Every structure is written in C-alpha cells, then in structure tokens.
Amino acid sequence: MRLTSFRFPYRFLHFALLAFCLCAGAPSHAQVHVEHAAYATREVAGFHDLISGPKAANLEIVSDLYLPAGVESPGVGPFPAMVILHGSGGEWGGRGKRHAALLTKNGIAALVVDTFKARNLTLDTGYIARLKRANLPDQIADAFAALAMLKQHPKIDADRIGVLGYSMGGVSALLAAHAVIADPLTQNGGGFSLHIGFYPPCFATTADTRTTGAEIVTLWGTEDKSTHRQACETYMETLEAGGSPVEIHWMEGAVHAWNSLSPGTFFPTAPHGSPCNYVVNANGTVRETVTAQAASTDRLFMNVMADCTAEGYSIAHNGDVDAAANRILLDAIRRYLP
C-alpha cells in the first residue's frame, strides 16, 4: 500500500500541476464540448434492493458529459473517462463541473452525475430528507448506469473508465470496487478501472471484502473531523487484502471539502457517520455493528446513523491542497487509465 503525506504551502506543486496540464493532451485554451446524456438508471430503496432487487431500469437520468476539445473531428478519441459523484450536499456548489473542466483540458472525458436532481430532490427538500430518499445505493446505481452508457459511447474508451467521488460520493466510489456490489450490477464483469475518493468517511464496507481488482486512490485531510484516520487506513488495508492496489494520500492541514468554494465554516451540529460501521451482506442486507441494528433501506440507514453518528466538522477551501490533490488526480488517471 502506497501512503504519502503532503505538507503546505509547497509552491512548486502549482508549477508541477501546470506543467502536467500543458503536456497531458488537449490544449488548455480550447473550448470544452458538453453533451446532455440521457440514460436509464434505477431508483432503489436501499442496498438490498440494489443488489437483490429487480434490475430493470425505472428512472431516466440526464448528466452533463464533458468531452475534450476537437471531439467532433474524425479520428479524435476515444478518450478515458471519469464518472463524478457528488457529496451529501449535492452538486449545487459545482465541484463536479469544475473537475470535469479540468479533466477535459487534460484529454479526459468526465460525466457529472446528479443523483438528487434525477429524483427531483432540491435544497428545499432538506438535508436528512434527501438522504432518506436517495443515499449510497441510489448513487451507486447511477454510477453503474453511467458506466454502461459510457461503454457504448463512440468517443469513450470502454476499458478506461474510472469513478471519482467527494465525501458521500467517495464512499460510493469505494463501495463500487467491492465485488459483491459490482458483480450484480455489471454484465459479464467489467466494472470501473479506477476508483478515486476525495475525503470519504469510512463507515461502510461489505462482509465479503473481495474487490474487482481495480486500483483505488484516496485523499483525506489530516484535520478533517468527519473522518477517522485509523478507521480509514484499516479500511484501505482491507481493500488491498481484497485484491486492489491502494494509494493513500494525507493532505496536511486540510479539513473537509478543500475543493469547495467555502471560505471556512465550522458546522457544530453537522452530522457525519464516521463512528458508524455499516456492513453490507452478499444479498444486500445491512447491519450497523456499533448499534447492532439493521439498515437495509435508505430510511433505516439514516435512522440508525442518528444513533451512532458524531457532530461537528469544518468545510474550507484550501488552494494549495486543491492544487496538489488535482495533481494527484491527474497523475493517477495517467498511470491507471493509460
């Protein structure tokens, strides 16, 4: 397992990132091409429904597909691609779109998936109410539906598709590497080729910890109170033992969501599930081991989290960390989706 720790400020990281961007492929000045991609997904009630329920689609989702400049020209492509999953706060802040623009300027396609919007959930819905309706299982269903769609796209290389998620989306991105989840959701295997998690809490795993074997890259802030370092490193050891190469990057001094636009806010009553431990069984039934309660539906998942959660963490943009994290992201894609 590869583990690194970054201390800041490191001004050379900005130059390293710029140098990588200038040599990685598509010209940085060219206009990004965006398609509105409609595809079929599933609205599911929880992990049991996701894994053992009917596989027929029951919902259409529309996502923005960012493609590198010049994609309309004959002979251009196919490109590697990343599916981008938002956090529990949604995509309203535009993190996914900003990363998609960065990726396309480096010759990488990106699909920004909005699980909440597809289910008509808004800021007015309320934080907990949204998560009782659409949680990890729905986001994972959307991710694999996106994967299936991208595999059929003429400008996407079907063998070079990864998934990137922030916070809750990072949890989904990592769970998508578990074979017990990926295998039922893919036809003839063929899951994601790379899984990247930006500051994902480590509160969910599977009883059968075998993975698809795809590479896993995670980034956490050393001052992020919504994650527990020991729990996360133990989880990464489990994934490595399950068959995936693993990289861990600890970003010195960073709190949660360093790539948000927040100038720095402490939320004293904001809940996070880091103390919890949800275990998904082969048939999708879920048990939270701290409280010994079943949590197989989204509503039960959130009800149980209220009994094992902690409160209070900060969200703050950090330009140095953001630049370094983007460098790690681009380097991982270059190495693992060559």
Image (spheres, rainbow, N blue to C red):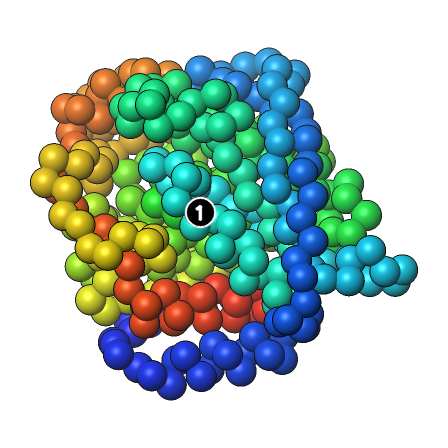
Depicted 228 relative to depicted 135: above or below: below
When asked about the image quadrant of residue 307, the answer is top left
Would residue 188 be found to the left or right of residue 62 on screen? right
Residue 281 in view here: no
Would residue 8 be found to the left or right of residue 186 on screen? left
- Residue 100 position, x and y percent, is 55, 54
Depicted 219 relative to depicted 167: above or below: below
**Amino acid type of the residue tagged 1 in the rendering:** Gly
User: What quarter of the picture does the C terminus occupy?
Assistant: bottom right
- Identify which residue, 40 or 124, lies in the foreground: 124
- Identify which residue, 262 or 149, lies in the foreground: 262
- Residue 87 position, x and y percent, is 38, 40
* Mark 1 surroundings within 10 Å by alpha-carbon count, few (fewer than 14), some (14 through 19), many (20 or more): some
- Residue 135 position, x and y percent, is 39, 27
Residue occupying the point 49% across, 21% down = 119
Would residue 11 be found to the left or right of residue 173 on screen? left
Would residue 107 be found to the left or right of residue 89 on screen? right
Q: Secondary structure at mark 1?
A: loop
Residue occupying the point 56% across, 75% down = 21
Residue occupying the point 35% across, 28% down = 123
User: What quarter of the picture does the N terminus occupy?
Assistant: bottom left
- Residue 182 position, x and y percent, is 55, 36
Residue 54 in view here: yes
- Identify which residue, 153 or 127, lies in the foreground: 127
Depicted 185 relative to depicted 210: above or below: above
Residue that mark 1 sits on: 94
Residue occupying the point 38% across, 85% down = 12
